[in-house]
Amino acid sequence: MALKIFFLILLFSFRFRLSLSGNGQTNSMESVPDLQKSMYMVVDGYPCVRLVNLSGEIGCSNPGRDKVVAPIIKYKNKKELGQPSAILLSMGDVQGFFSRYVLPISMFLRSPWECLPELGKFCSNTQLVLRKHLNVKDHIQRISNDSSFASNVAGVLVESRVEIQHKLKGFSPARKFPQAEFAPYHDNTYEWNPIGSGIMWKSYNFPVFLLSESSTSTLQEIAMKNEKTEKAYTTNVAEFDVVMQTTKVGTHDSESCLKEETCLPLGGYRWLDQRGESYAALDFYASI
C-alpha cells in the first residue's frame, strides 16, 4: 500500500503550463495523467491493519469507506487540534500518543476465553465488563479531556529513524501481563512486561502508517512547510486510500462477518514490529 501526498493547487483553466528549471521551456498538461503526476507524490509506508476475532476488533482502519484527506502537521503534544489532521509522529512519542487516544468504556468487552461453560464461566457476547486493573474514574476523565483531540485525528504517520530507535529506553505495544487470560492463577497484577502499554490490543478509528526512512525525511519537510504557511490558502495534505475493514458495515467481529459472508481478507505489515533497519514483509492477515 502506498500513501499519497496530495498538493492542493488553485486551478484557473483547463490548460496548464509548468516552468522547467534552467531552460525556460514549458510543459503543457493536456491529460488527466499529466495533472495527476504534478499533484501527487507516492510515499512508502507500512500500514497498521484491522484484525477481527470473536470478541471484537483491534488495529486501525478508515472511519468509513471513503478516502481520508487531511493536512499534515507535526505532533507537539498539542492539547487541541483545530481541524482533522494527519499527524506526523516520532517513534519516541508513539506510546504516549496512542495511550492518550482512549476509546469509550463500551469497547472493553469480555474476551471469548472468559466465557467458557466447561469452566463454569457464562456470559453473553455483548456483556460489558471492566477489568480489575481499570481505573474507571481516570478512564472517563481522559476521554472527557481528549475527546476533541481524538475526533480530529484523521490519520497518523510514524517516523522511522535508526538513531531515534537507538535512543529509546524501551518500547513494547504488548500488555504488562501478556496473555493474562491463560494464567493458571487468579492474580494477574504482576507486571511481567513493565514497559508494556497494551496499545496493540486496542481499536483505532483512523489509518496509521510507519514510514520508511526516506519517506520520513520527505514528510518532515512537508510538515515544516505547512507550519510556515499555516495561514496560506494552499496546503499539503495526506490522502489515505486504504479502507481496511470488512465488506459490510456493522460486522465488528468474526462471528457477524462470517454469518453475513462478508469477511474480507486483509494484507499488510505489522508496523509496530518494524522498528529495525530491515523492512522485510511479514505475514498477511485475514479478518477471522
Image: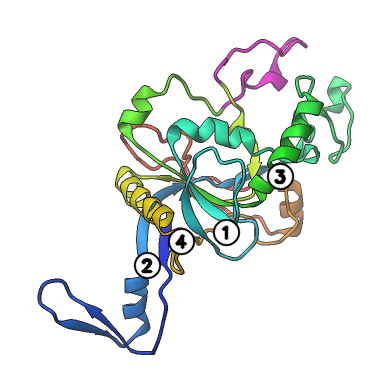
Mark 3 belongs to which amino acid?
A: Ser
Q: Distance between the residues labelled 2 and 1?
A: 19 Å
Q: Distance between the residues labelled 4 and 2?
A: 10 Å
Name the residue carrying label 4: 237
Q: Does the magenta stretch include residue 265?
A: no
Q: How many residues crowd around disc 4 within 10 Å: few (fewer than 14), some, or many (20 or more)? A: many
The part of the chain drawn in magenta is 174-195
Figure coloring: rainbow
Mark 2 belongs to which amino acid?
A: Tyr
Q: Is residue 51 above or below residue 249?
A: above
The mark that comes first in sequence, 1 or 3, is: 3
The total number of labels drawn is: 4
Q: Helix, strand, or loop for circle 3?
A: helix
Name the residue carrying label 1: 243
Q: Distance between the residues labelled 4 and 3?
A: 23 Å
Q: Helix, strand, or loop for circle 4?
A: strand
Q: How many residues crowd around disc 1 within 10 Å: few (fewer than 14), some, or many (20 or more)? A: many
User: Could you tell me if the residues under marks 2 and 1 are in contact, i.e. CB atoms within 8 Å?
Assistant: no
Q: Helix, strand, or loop for circle 1?
A: loop
Picture residue at 68% right of the left edge, 38% below the top = 102
Name the residue carrying label 2: 40
Q: Nearer the viewer, mark 2 or mark 1?
A: 2
Q: Distance between the residues labelled 1 and 3?
A: 23 Å
- Residue farthest front in this picture: 231
Residue 141 position within the rendered picture, expressed as x and y whole percent measured from the top left: 76, 33
Mark 1 belongs to which amino acid?
A: Val
Residue 187 position within the rendered picture, expressed as x and y whole percent measured from the top left: 75, 10
Give the image quarter of residue 197: top right
Give the image quarter of residue 130: top right
